[in-house]
Amino acid sequence: MKPSFSSRASTATCLFSLLFLQTSLLDLRAAEAEPSDLRYFRELVETRNYTLGQPVSPKLTPDGRSVIFLRSGPRDPVLRLYEFTIADGALREILTPEKLLQGAEEKLSAEEKSRRERARQSLRGFTSFELSKDASKVLVALGGRLYLINRADSAVTELPGRDWIDPKFSPDGKFVAAVSGRELHVIDLEQKSERAITSGATETIEHGVAEFVAQEEMDRREGYWWSPDSKSLAYQETDYSGVETRFIVDPLHPEAAPARNFYPRAGTPNAKVRLGIIAREGGTTRWVEWDREKYPYLARVVWKEAAAPLCVLVQNRAQQEQLLLAVDPQTGTTRELLREKDAAWLELDPKPMPVWMKDGSAFLWTTEQRGGWQLELRRADGTVQREITAPAFGLEQLIDLDDAARSVVVAGGADPRERHLFQLSLDREEEPRRLTSEAGRHDAVFGESKEQFVHKFQLLDGRSGWEVMPLSGGSVVHALPSMAERPSALPALELTRTEGARPFDAAVIRPRDFRKNGRYPVILDVYAGPSSKQVIAQPDRYMIDQWMADRGYIVVVLDGRGTPGHGRDWSRAVRDDLISVALEDQITGLRSLAKRYPQLDLTRVGVVGWSFGGYFSAIAAMRHPEIFRAGVVGAPVVTWENYDTHYTERYLGLPQENPEAYRVSNVLTYAKDLERPLLLMHGMTDDNVYFQHAAQLADALFQLGKPFDFLPLLGTHMVSDPVLRLRRQTRIMEFFDAELQPRQTSGKRARSP
C-alpha cells in the first residue's frame, strides 16, 4: 500500500509511512529550493550537531610528548587515526580505513553491530584503538580484522584471524587477546600466530563477551581482563540456555532468516554468568567462587595493579545489595572487602571501581551511602580511611589518580548542569583546587605523566574542543586540531530553575524572532527517566530544540525527581512507579515557568520524547489531556514486563512480586483515556525496546476505537542516518503544526479538535 497522509477520522485509523534508510543525501541536495529551516536541520544532522571533525578518544603517550586520537571529516562519519606532537604542534595522519579497504566496503559481523548499538556508536572506520604500554604500537580493528601499526614508521601488519571483536593488548605489549566464534583467543605478536584459549562454546555458551544487560544497562562492555603480568586472563562465561529468545525480521527482506537474540524480560531468567581464570596459553580454568545464586550480576571486574588483587563487584538480582570481593587467582577463592545496601536500588559508577594505589596499600571507592555521591579512600582490607569528598560536593566522576603526588582529579561541582574539574589531596583536609572556571561541561584525559592533561571543553558560549593544559595552571600548551564546522548561531537558550518547594533545572529555548508580547505554543522535549540528566550547560544539546522553536514554539526541557545530581533521595523518588512522580514534576515545572514567562501558552502544549521519553509522552497525553494537547511517542516502552531485567527490576522489582508497580507504570493501563492526537513511531528492527511495544499500543488503541497516527521506521533504537533524522523530525513538526498552531495557517493538515 502506498503511504499517505489523511485527516483524523472519528474511528481508529493508523497512518503507516515507511522511512527508508537507503534514501540518498543527494536527493536532499538536489531539491531546487530547499527551505532555510530544512537546510539548517540538514546541516545539523550531517555534522552530528557540529561534532564531526572533532578529536575522538585522545590518549597521551607515556612520555607525554604526543597525543594519539581519532578524527573524522566535518560531514564524514568515518574515523581515522592521527598523532599530534605537543612540542611543535605537528599533526600526522597515521592510518585511514580507506588505505586498508582499498575501495571495498567495511562489513561488520552481527556481534559487532550489536556491540555498537549497545555503545550507541554510529560512526564508522576505526571506532577505537589500543596503545601498547610503551606506545610503540597501535592496534586497530576494521571489518573484523586486526591491524598492528608500528608508530615510528606507520608500518602496518595484518594479524591472523577474522571476525574479531574487543581486541586488547597484553600489559607487556607482546600479545593481543580478542574474541571470535564465541571463544577467547590470544595472538602472539612475535610469532604472528593465534590460538583459542577457551573451548566449549555453543549456540548458548559464550566466552569473553559481556552479556546483553551488562552492555546495555551496567556500562560494562568487557568480557575478559588481562592479568597485570600478562601471564593469564580472567574471562566471563555466559550461559544463555535459560534466556528467552527473540527474533527480529528485516521487513525489506522477507526471504532472509530472522536475527535471533537472547533477551531477558523482567521477571524471566537471566543469562548465567561466571568468571574464570586461565593461562595465556590455555589449559584448565579456575572458576572464581562466590554465591552466584544470591548475587547473579557480575557488575565490575578490575585487575590492573600487580600489587593489588583481582576484584569483582557482584549484585543481587534486586540490585539492593552488592559485594566487593578480592579474588585469589591461584585458587579462585574470594574474600569480602565491602558490602553495600540500599532499600531502593544501588547505582553503579560508570567508571570501574575500585581504583587501587599502585602499591596495593589502599583503593579509591565511590559511594552514595551517605546520601550523595562521594569519593572514599579505603585501606586494603576495605575499611574506610578517609572521605575525600563530602556528600554535598556534587561528585560526578573520578578522572585520575596520581599516586606519587597523593592526589586525584575529579569532575563535578555544586551545579549539576555544569561539570568542572577539581584536584584534591588524598591526605589533607583542604578546599578542592578548581581547574576549570568557564561555564559549561569539562572533561580530562591523563597519561602516565601527570604534568599535563588533555582537556575537553563544551562551553555555554558555544566554544568546544580539546586542548593540552598544564596541571599546575597557566596557558594552554596546544589545541588539538579540529575540522568541525561551527554553527552560524547558537540556540536562544536560557538555563534556569523553577520556583516552588522543589526547584527543577529547566531550559527554555525561544524562537530567534521571539516577541515579548507574543503567545507561543509550547513543546516539552522530554526524557524524564531515572538516572539521566537532560538540562545541561551545553548548547549543542539544544540545537534541534532551536529548530523546533524557530517554527513558532517555545521549547522547554525539565529535570524532575529521578534525575542525577540532587542526591540519593531525589533520585530514588521514582521507586515502584515510573510515571506518577515524573508527570507531577514535569507539569509542576511547566506551570511554574508559565507564571514567570507569560509568553508560554499552556493551552497549546505538545510533548515529544524517545525511548523513556516516548513512554512518558504516551501516558502524559492519556492522563493529562488538560495539559498536553498532542503527543509524539518515539520507541516507547509500553509494557515493562517486556523490557529487560536489569533496568526494569531496578525500579519496579520483579513483576511476580510487585504487580501493582507494573500496572501503574503500564501505558496500556491508561489507553482507554486517550483523547488527544498521538503520533507513534518506532524502529522495526529495534533490539533494545522491541517493536512489540509499539504494536501492543497500536493494537490496544485500535481495539478501543481511539484515533492515532503510526509511523513504523526501518531502523533500530538509535537513529543516526541524516536523511532518516530529517524526515522523522519534519514529520514531527508537521504533526505539531497541525495540532498546536492556529487552524487558519496555510499548509497545515486539517484535523478535528
Image (cartoon, rainbow, N blue to C red):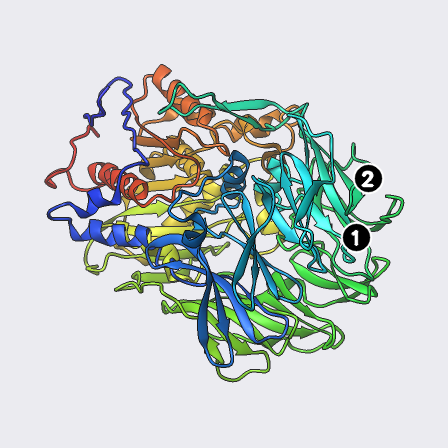
Q: Residue furthest top?
A: 703
- Would you place residue 31 above or below residue 53 in this image? above
469 relative to 276, above or below: below
Identify whether 613 is placed above or below 424.
Answer: above
Q: Are marks 2 and 1 in contact (CB under 8 Å)?
A: no
Name the side, left or right, on which 403 lies relative to 30: right
Residue type at mark 2: give it. Gly
Q: On screen, 613 above or below 704?
A: below
The residue depicted at 14 percent of the width and 45 percent of the height is 31
3D distance between C-alphas at marks 2 and 1: 12 Å
Decide if residue 48 is in sight here: no
Q: Position of residue 524 (x, y in %)?
A: 35, 46
Give the image location of residue 583, x and y in percent: 45, 40
Horizontal relation, residue 401 to residue 696: left or right: right
Residue at which label 2 appears: 283
Q: Which residue is mark 1?
A: 231
Q: Secondary structure at mark 1?
A: loop
Image side of residue 9 versus residue 687, left or right = left
Answer with mark 2 or mark 1, whichever residue precedes in sequence: 1
Q: Nearer the viewer, residue 681 or 176?
A: 176
Q: Secondary structure at mark 2?
A: loop
Q: Residues within 10 Å of mark 2 (few under 14, many from 20)?
A: few
Q: Residue at x 65, y 77 (%)?
A: 431
Q: Identity of the amino acid at label 1?
A: Lys
Q: Quadrant of residue 180?
A: top right
Quarter assignment of residue 165: top right
